[in-house]
Amino acid sequence: MKERNTISRFIEENYLHFNAAALMDAAKGYEKHLEEGGKMMITLAGAMSTAELGKTLAEMIRQDKVQIISCTGANLEEDIMNLVAHNSYKRVPNYRDLSPQEERELLDGGFNRVTDTCIPEEEAFRRLQQHIHKIWKEADAKGERYLPHEYMYKMLLSGDLEQYYEIDPKNSWMLAAAEKNLPIICPGWEDSTMGNIFASYCLKGELKPTTMKSGIEYMTWLADWYVENSKGKGVGFFQIGGGIAGDFPICVVPMLYQDLEMEDIPFWSYFCQISDSTTSYGSYSGAVPNEKITWGKLDIDTPKFIVESDATIVAPLIFAWLLNY
């Protein structure tokens, strides 16, 4: 039996019932899936990058405990913003008590609030903008086209941002992903800040919309990746939150099975969702895993877990177990 380190031992000894037990079961299921040769997709919704999930996720990437990530455009960019502007972030512990006037004062001061954390406009958004714009412009001029995360990788790997680093770079999951060229799916990227900025350049006639590859191209790329990687033990699905980051990639299986008539394509071979959504059959985020059987995403015997809790608490603990912290 594996010798457990401090945090892992604490979880094993104390997380025995209810949501705590679900956390433990999900972590052990994830571990078993990898040990048996399976691969894992992690999906990131919400503001997990601003919550600094990179402190554990980056090491998960380095240790090959995740093979592909699906995330919102916000998570794609906010990890890099934290990397280059961390010291200028502003924390507002009493965020529940803010008046509309105080919220406006934050805006006027150049801060965009995410719960209790305010991202600085100039040091974060605009700092990235000047560097990513140059990369977009070069591709546009050459008639080249890339996916949103590929542009981010180019920016990170160029070394141009190193002058701004304000956290230990080992805690940036995007930097770890770029260094491994980890596959990323980023559906709905257009609604992110960088997506809005890219659209603004298109409206001004500085860039062509076609310089950025689309969500359909993400889906077709994912289809090819899934066919290639679902052999053997298959691919598991570890979903943090709900929304498009999870709903978009999980649909690749029914698309392959039903629309491309690939009747032998395996279902997802592990499923876990961390969500504080109220259980509801009218909601994607709140649906129980068994509903996904009817949509051709999971099978009867797929290991299924739901941890009904705050992902900023649960995900680092599960990652700590997998990393044997």
Image: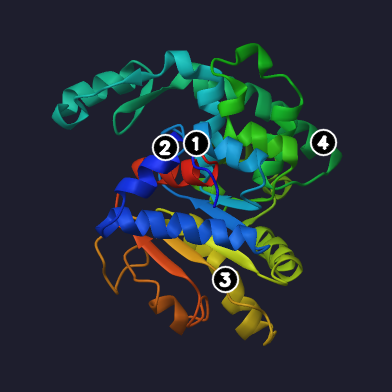
Amino acid carrying label 4: it is Ala
Q: Name the residue carrying label 2.
A: 7
- In contact (CB < 8 Å): disc 2 and disc 1: yes
Q: Of marks 2 and 1, which one's residue comes earlier in the chain?
A: 2
Total numbered circles: 4
The answer to whether any part of residue 194 appears in the image is no
Q: Name the residue carrying label 4.
A: 141
The answer to whether any part of residue 162 appears in the image is yes
Residue 84 position, x and y percent, is 56, 19
Residue 311 position, x and y percent, is 37, 46
Give the number of the disc on residue 269: 3
**SS of the residue under disc 4:** helix
Amino acid carrying label 1: it is Tyr
- Alpha-carbon neighbours of circle 3 within 10 Å: few (<14), some, or many (≥20)? many
Q: Residues under labels 2 and 1: Cα distance?
A: 5 Å
Q: Nearer the viewer, mark 2 or mark 4?
A: 2
Q: Residues under labels 2 and 4: Cα distance?
A: 51 Å
Give the number of the disc on residue 325: 1
Residue 225 position, x and y percent, is 73, 63
Q: Residues under labels 3 and 4: Cα distance?
A: 43 Å
Residue 215, image quadrant = bottom right
